[in-house]
Image (cartoon, helix red, strand yellow):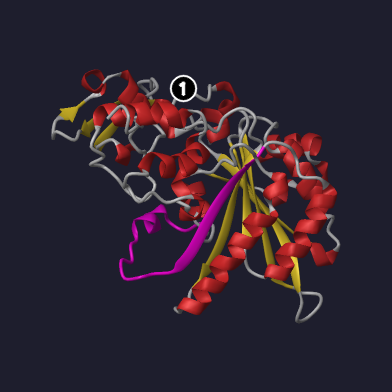
Amino acid sequence: MLRKHGLSVDHVLDAKLVDVNGKILDKESMGEDLFWAIRGGGGASSGVILSYKIKLIPVPENVSVKIKLIPVPENVSVFRIERSLDEEENVTDIVYKWQQVAPTTDDNLWMRMLIQPVSSRVNEGEKTIIVSILTMFLGNAEELVALLDKDFPELGLKKDGVMEMSWIESVVWWANYDNGTSPSVLLDRNPDSANFLKRKSDYVHTPISKDGLEWLWKKMIELGKTGLVFNPYGGKMNEIPDSATAFPHRAGNLFKIQYFVNWDEEGIELEKNYIAQIRRLYSYMTPFVSKNPRSAFLNYRDLDIGINNNDKNSYEEGEVYGVKYFNDNFHRLVKVKTAVDPHNFFRNEQSIPTNPSKA
């Protein structure tokens, strides 16, 4: 719901943090700069965050729910549509049009797009590209179909392809459970399970051309496994200044790309192969994504874009990944870090460094 309501950090009113001296601070005692830094700036660089206080909205007395963070209708609408390149389902046209529509359409609509190389159902033994569009709409099915008839007729969405459900049921649906599964399944945990994965990220400012997409399909098929997720921005994200919180990726970003590859089998050689594959696709995407800096999303923790050894070169090493994660906000984060943790006690491979000349 970021296109409608922004990010969680945009709704934080207060926080509790343990600083390097062991003191518990709140918004008032930590000061404006530190409070700014722990909203989207990687709070672990500054201390141990105990809690956040989130903004609530008024709830009428006749409503059974007593706490509400943001307004959500009684029912939301979801759908999933798949198109295959080898079945001549105008995949390139749909992906090109998605780039125009998803970041600019009604703020109540969020359309994620997955692009994956898979085994062909038409040509045995060959690979093809499957494009899946998964959507949540804060409204009913009729409104959604009417909206996409106008904004995205290439999808051919019909009402019988849309499911209406409560918001918590949509969370279950997004978690890839069958429709009708009880939300209690979200409480299930299997601490002994493990899988292997690698994630990378990019931001896109201008649509990728149809020729560029056709070239991309060939490269993805050659690589064989790495997929892409396009997450649209726009809406509320365009209204909040880059410097309002430490999270900088606001207006000007059409969508964020998540590169993903997963595997189940153990083995160093297998791991090397998949990681090399995702890095190669990331390299191929260079002409299509943000530049100076080539921005990245902090929460995917991509160590490929820079690692800090936290030694005498800490600032120079931190700047390499820091400006990618935080753009111009990186320099303010360094000032905050230097003031609150001058000896760099709170550190990791990609923490905010101190400014050695000020520490």
Q: Secondary structure at mark 1?
A: loop
Could you say which quadrant of the image residue 129 lies in?
Answer: bottom right
Q: Quick one: 337 or 16, which is closer to the camera?
A: 337
**What residue is drawn where x is 69% and y is 34%?**
143
**What residue is drawn where x is 54% and y is 39%?**
75
**What residue is drawn where x is 32% and y is 44%?**
312
10 Å crowding of disc 1: few (<14), some (14-19), many (20+): some
The amino acid at mark 1 is Ala
**In the picture provided, is 82 more to the left or to the right than 19?**
right
* Residue 91 visible to the viewer: no
Q: Is residue 181 above or below residue 262?
A: above
* Residue 242 visible to the viewer: yes
Q: Is residue 236 magenta?
A: no
**What residue is drawn where x is 25% and y is 32%?**
342
Q: Quick one: 216 or 359, which is closer to the camera?
A: 359
Q: Position of residue 294 (x, y in %)?
A: 60, 42
**In the picture provided, is 113 more to the left or to the right than 21?**
right
Picture mark count: 1
Q: Position of residue 278 (x, y in %)?
A: 59, 62
Q: Position of residue 44 (x, y in %)?
A: 30, 41
Could you say which quadrant of the image residue 120 lies in?
Answer: bottom right
What residue does disc 1 label?
244
For the magenta stretch, what is the residue range?
180-204
Q: Position of residue 69 (x, y in %)?
A: 40, 29
Q: Quick one: 23 or 50, which is closer to the camera?
A: 23
**In the picture provided, is 78 more to the left or to the right than 169?**
right
